[in-house]
Amino acid sequence: MHGTLHYSLLCPSFLLLCLWGRPFLDAKEAIPIPIGVVLDLNSSIGSVSNSCIWMAYQDFYQRHPHYKTRLTLQTRDSEQNVVTAASVAQELLNEKVHAIIGPQTSEQAWFVIELGSKAQVPVISFSATSPSLSSTQKPYFIRTARDDSSQVEAISDIVEVYGWREIVPIYEDTEYGNGLNLYLHDAFVNIGTRVPYRCVIGPHFGVEEISKELEKVKCMATKVFLVHMSSEVGCKLFLAAKKSGMMAKGYAWIVTEGLSAEVDPMILKCMDSMQGVLGVRPRPNHSKRLENFKERWKVLLSGKGNNESNGTNVTIFGLWAYDTVWALAKAVENVWKQNALSQNHNATNTTLLNTILATKFHGLSGSFHLVKGQLEPSTLEVFNVVEQSERSIANWMPERGLSKLKQPKWPGNTTEPPAKLRIGIPPTNSVNEFKKVLNFSFDVFFEALKILPFPLHYEFTPYKIHGSYDELLMQIKEKRYDAVVGDVTIVANRSNYVDFTMPFSESGVAMLVLAKHDERQNIWIFLKPFSWDLWLTTGAAFIFIGFIVWFIEHRSNSEFRGTPKNQLGMALWFSFSTLVFAHRERVVNNWSRFVLIIWFFVVLIITQSYTASLASILTVQKLQPAFMDAEEIKRNNYLVGYHQDSFVRGLLIEKLGFKESKLKGYDGPEAYQHALSLGSNNGGVAAIFDEIVFINLFLMKYGSKKYQMVGPTYKTDGFAFAFPRNSPLVPYFSRAITNVTENRTTFDGIKKKYFSSDVMSEDASTSMALESPNLTLKSFGGLYIITLLTSLLALTVRLFKMIHSKFIARDFQRSLSEMMIELEKHFNKEESSLHSPQNSTPGME
């Protein structure tokens, strides 16, 4: 294509005179540096690139007229032949060039790089893009382009976004075509896309031979193809594909950058046969300098007065060729500044090699920065062939992936992709209340689809009846589904094989049990406020306080004297009468009063607490659950139920410690109601464990007078949608779900459509009524300890004084029994009238 035209543009004198009218100044005074150029001058890429090389040469020295070095370009035509390319390269090496720009193809580059390495001359190619060529293996090879593997991630992201699980690569049987296979294989394995067949096209195949190869893949189920070949072979391929009816609706084609008109203008000849094709290509950074260059390019072409040239635009290879000359010219000047040109030829070339690798600047194609001997990866553009143009529909960046993906037109002039996203959903045959949650999930999904920045074509596929949710999610890992939508709970172990979106509802697991009869019907309700240990301790405390006061007051207070029967009655009466502060007996001993002050305080607290608790029981209508927690059920070895096919079964076994033999699965509220009504001893269960949303739906249907939800609540991360691990769709859906849930009008509208209240929340349950616990001994333990200590203190002091007043030192030599008898008599002897209640002025004894 355009062979004669472009070759006429290759003459350096024509370029200089056409654009500026005169060559650059001071060239004779500069130090000439011989540089070889090896191109296929009669190819479209070669002719355009050669023109760009000479424009770069002129622009550089126009910008830097004071430089002391000048490149002397010696151009050779490889005539699209590997042997010729090697021959002319050897000719240039014999002429002691310091570097070779080229050759053009990867096949030619293999031989030229070998020659350059042996001669220690840098070989700089801007178009040999096969990843099999590496500067790590051949240190004298520099690629001022990006290798083909840099586009693999972008291609795999496109394949994954559209949910294609099978793809057939079609490539030419050359170094260029074969070089990408390994990288594509690894990328497709990572996203779970299978390659059932590879179609290899010979570089010299005609349209008829290609058609025969295409017939082999036409009969296959896979309708998605990836094409990686040169423009010459690619044009014949698409002509054959159109002839075979493979450019119609139902097919999808992706091409690599070599089949873009922005890369090779030859593609313009066969663009009619490529309608609906998607492709990736490098995206140069737009700048004023680049726009100015394109305008000059148009002037250059129009100066020939040939209309055929009007379709030949600047290509990315042309821009890379332009930047290559600038990089080389900069490097040569820097080598001269280092006084390295005076060394021997090989040493100069080595210095030049290292200087080129370290060169950085902003060129026409963007940032010129070599990493590991080649241009670092940067932004790619995803294009769609529509009519006679390549429409940009997305960008791809290494750090961000795809962005701003627009609706493409597919073969057959349709917007419907050939392969839809296969979305698995739980069985929808249920007619019970729980189906509302599933329908709620679908509506959230539909709203999220409206927010996605790109159209998503999908089809719902219900999973088998009675299949568990874990099995449903496992279908994603096994590549049978591309996503799962429904009331799927985020659980840690599921994250090992799927990725979840942001949750669209909160969730948790609680226990559903039967409610007890109203405790107000119990004739012993008055005993309910205190636990039995508190009742017994309180009674003992009354008796103990009565004894302490009687002991202290017995000798000095006539009201605490008399017959043993009367004294016992008095002690008990006095003690229990303090409960309502109805005692009439005076106490005359200050130690008694000290004990009673503490006791009155204790009695006040106990009576007030009892009154408050009993009032609560009698006035507040509460149904009490039959069981309070899972531990109580396990202790009694009762059966429990759970939502069939859900993750709750695993939670009961692994976290709550239930035996598998004690678990029974149920599939809806009617089954729950029947099982609870029977009870564990009659073929049913003692409790049902399920997520709060389903328990709330059950209670909405059957009411909270017979059933109650009790805690504690076992938190989960909520409902979400599931995708394959590392799916690019997850962040898109997560952002969309966040927008849906934050739009209260939309989200509340969805909830009201299915639920009369916010059943998604634990706080929404009207039945989360826990039994008011009895007041226990632990609640008043501190008070009783203080009472005990103060009473024992008073008793000890009183007993010590009594012993001290009765005995002297020699009395202790008597036997213990004699002393006890004497002490008893002394204790029963009334003290003098000085201490009688009527006459005494009490004091501490």
Image (cartoon, rainbow, N blue to C red):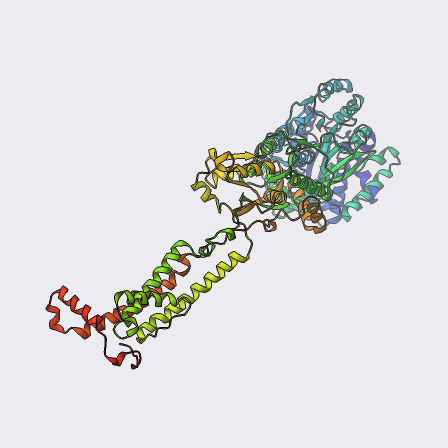
Q: Quadrant of residue 124?
A: top right
Q: Is residue 229 left or right of residue 480?
A: right
493 vs 478: above or below: below
From the image, which quarter does the N terminus lie in?
top right
402 vs 568: above or below: above
Q: Quadrant of residue 400?
A: top right
Is residue 283 something that shows in the picture?
no
- At a point 51% along the width and 60% down the height, the residue shown is 615
Is residue 15 something that shows in the picture?
yes
Where residue 85 sits in the image (x, y, percent)? 69, 27
Count of number-bearing discs: 0
From the image, which quarter does the C terminus lie in?
bottom left
The residue lying toward the viewer, choosing from 818 and 198, is 818
The residue lying toward the viewer, choosing from 814 and 744, is 814
Where residue 279 sits in the image (x, y, percent)? 73, 34
Where residue 717 sits in the image (x, y, percent)? 57, 45
The residue lying toward the viewer, choosing from 143 and 391, is 391
- At a point 46% along the width and 62% down the height, the residue shown is 609
Where residue 485 sits in the image (x, y, percent)? 65, 37
Q: Is residue 277 left or right of residue 708?
A: right
- At a point 84% along the width and 38% down the height, the residue shown is 301
